[in-house]
């Protein structure tokens, strides 16, 4: 019997020691309502819950015991015994296994094995937070790389935008543009150049009328013969007449020798008469003679002289309207208008802007020895959106300035200034004329008023001298004299 008792004691001792050294918390609960055993880990963690008189007490240990009993009750109800559960006890996370068994005389006993997993759990949470952060950092990084790539692609595209254009061979005097109107224009120039027919080139100011005249002459059979350009607007009538047709000795004061006019000098070649809409009726008659009969009469002479000159004329005025108003001869209009080349304004062929811009960049980077290699697409868009009241000449001016002012190899918005010419043409706000004339002599006042009237009317009639002179009831020669006296340039008043 002693031996049996000794064995029981030994087993109990070993069992107790085993439970005592376990790092996990172990509790033995009796009947689901009192704690019969706690190992040191459990006591250390919960406090001693074994001697509590009533688990419903108010101290902390009673509350903890009540919570444990509740866990046992719910596990039994949900049949979760023997499985590992995670419970939260006052913000502490515990892993718990419940093992019910039948004790002496049928007592209901529960082993509760518990492990504190709060740290492990928060490390896990941290880890998943870090994982998430790393993931979002990587996602952001990838997005940024993609964005950078997109920007790089755009920049590469932009960089290449004018590369081909910039690298193409640059030729002075070429007519640039690939829009349908420009292609038609080029075709027409090729078709009419080789004939000797008179050509009238029409189009707004700065559209390229002179350029077209040059091309016609270059492609004609007269390309190796003299080519003279006369701007009918810049010299007065009598000078223009003697300049073109020559004069006989004694024709006017100072004509002490006979002199050949340009039509004779250029014989066999071409004459370009720019601003033809501004010539006087007398000049119109003389020109009609050249066109009809192929002859001129020198000023002060009466002998017709045969000339062989091709005439290319140009105007930005509406000659048909001038005929209608009686300031331009109908027969001369017909003679000039045998072949009409009409150049559309730039705003009607905006597709040409890219070609024109690169053409002018090439022209001016060479002239100013600048190394412009890049023109951002945003700049090109701005240029394409502009209305270009001054047409190709205005575009050329804008690019010329930009190239000159560019600080690197790129043209930026800082260098882009549009002509304000059309705004400058708006008459200044009215100031009382008498205020302005105060202190002047009557003669000076009259001159000022006359100058003001001439300027205003020329502006109103788009710089058309013949029309303005007619409207003011002044002879054209007298009108030109006045313009000279007051130093007024009709061209600047268009
Ligand atoms: N298609 C084009 N390609 C290249 N350069 C052009 C083109 N059109 C016009 N230009 C340039 O624009 C500028 C103005 O052209 P141009 O003097 O021929 O115009 P215009 O119509 O005769 O002007 P205006 O009415 O004032 O006499 C010139 O430098 C010319 O070389």
Image (tube, helix red, strand yellow):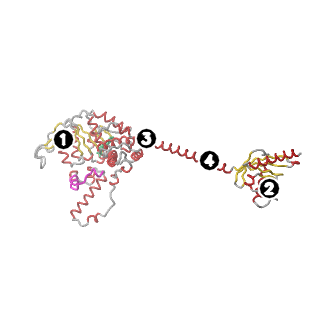
Describe the element under mark 1 as helix, strand or loop.
helix
Ligand 1 quadrant assignment: top left
Question: Where in the figure is residue 200, as x and y percent of width and height?
Answer: 29, 40
Can I make out residue 471 in this image? yes
Magenta span: helix, strand or loop, mainly? helix
Q: Which residues are magenta?
A: 479-494
The quadrant in which the N terminus is found is top right
Which of pointers 4 and 1 indicates the residue nearer the eye?
Answer: 4
**Residue 262, label in figure:** 1
Question: Could you give the CA–CA distance between mark 3 and mark 4, rounded to whole angstroms?
Answer: 42 Å
Identify residue for label 4: 127
Q: Residues within 10 Å of mark 4 (few under 14, many from 20)?
A: few
Quickly name the residue at label 3.
Answer: 156
Find disc 2 in the rendering and name its residue. Answer: 50
Q: Secondary structure at mark 3?
A: helix
Verify CB contact (< 8 Å) between mark 3 and mark 2: no
Q: Residue 479 at what x, y percent from top left?
A: 23, 53
Q: Secondary structure at mark 2?
A: loop
Mark 3 and mark 2 lie on one chain; the one further toward the N terminus is 2
- Identify which residue, 243 or 330, lies in the foreground: 243
């Amino acid at each position: 019997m002693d031996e049996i008792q000794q064995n029981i004691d030994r087993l109990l001792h070993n069992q107790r020691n085993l439970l005592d050294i376990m790092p996990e918390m172990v509790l033995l609960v009796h009947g689901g309502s009192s704690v019969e055993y706690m190992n040191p880990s459990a006591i250390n963690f919960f406090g001693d819950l074994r001697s509590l008189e009533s688990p419903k007490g108010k101290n902390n240990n009673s509350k903890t015991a009540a919570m444990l009993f509740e866990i046992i009750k719910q596990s039994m109800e949900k049949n979760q015994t023997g499985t590992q559960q995670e419970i939260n006890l006052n913000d502490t996370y515990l892993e718990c296994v419940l093992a019910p068994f039948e004790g002496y005389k049928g007592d209901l006993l529960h082993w509760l094995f518990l492990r504190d997993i709060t740290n492990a759990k928060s490390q896990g949470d941290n880890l998943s937070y870090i994982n998430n952060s790393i993931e979002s950092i990587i996602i952001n990084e990838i997005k940024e790389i993609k964005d950078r790539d997109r920007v790089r692609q755009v920049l590469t595209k932009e960089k290449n935008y004018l590369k081909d254009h910039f690298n193409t061979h640059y030729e002075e005097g070429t007519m640039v543009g690939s829009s349908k109107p420009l292609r038609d224009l080029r075709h027409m120039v090729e078709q009419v150049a080789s004939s000797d027919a008179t050509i009238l080139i029409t189009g707004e100011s700065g559209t390229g009328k002179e350029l077209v005249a040059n091309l016609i002459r270059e492609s004609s059979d007269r390309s190796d013969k003299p080519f003279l350009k006369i701007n009918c607007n810049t010299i007065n009538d009598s000078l223009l007449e003697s300049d073109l047709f020559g004069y006989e000795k004694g024709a006017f004061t100072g004509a002490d020798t006979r002199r050949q006019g340009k039509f004779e000098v250029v014989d066999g070649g071409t004459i370009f008469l720019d601003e033809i809409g501004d010539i006087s009726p007398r000049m119109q008659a003389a020109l009609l003679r050249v066109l009809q009969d192929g002859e001129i009469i020198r000023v002060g002479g009466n002998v017709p002289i045969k000339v062989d000159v091709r005439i290319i004329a140009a105007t930005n005025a509406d000659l048909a309207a001038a005929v209608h108003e009686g300031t331009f001869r109908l027969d001369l209009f017909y003679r000039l208008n045998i072949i009409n080349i009409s150049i559309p304004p730039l705003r009607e062929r905006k597709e040409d802007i890219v070609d024109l811009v690169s053409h002018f960049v090439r022209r001016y980077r060479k002239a100013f020895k600048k190394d412009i290699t890049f023109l951002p697409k945003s700049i090109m868009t701005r240029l394409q959106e502009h209305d270009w009241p001054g047409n190709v000449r205005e575009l050329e001016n804008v690019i010329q300035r930009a190239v000159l002012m560019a600080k690197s190899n790129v043209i930026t918005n800082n260098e882009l200034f549009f002509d304000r010419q059309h705004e400058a043409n708006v008459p200044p706000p009215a100031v009382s004329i008498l205020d302005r004339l105060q202190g002047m002599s009557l003669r000076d006042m009259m001159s000022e008023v006359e100058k003001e009237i001439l300027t205003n009317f020329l502006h109103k009639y788009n710089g058309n001298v013949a029309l303005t002179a007619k409207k003011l009831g002044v002879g054209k020669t007298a009108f030109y004299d006045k313009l000279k006296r007051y130093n007024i340039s009709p061209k600047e008043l268009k």
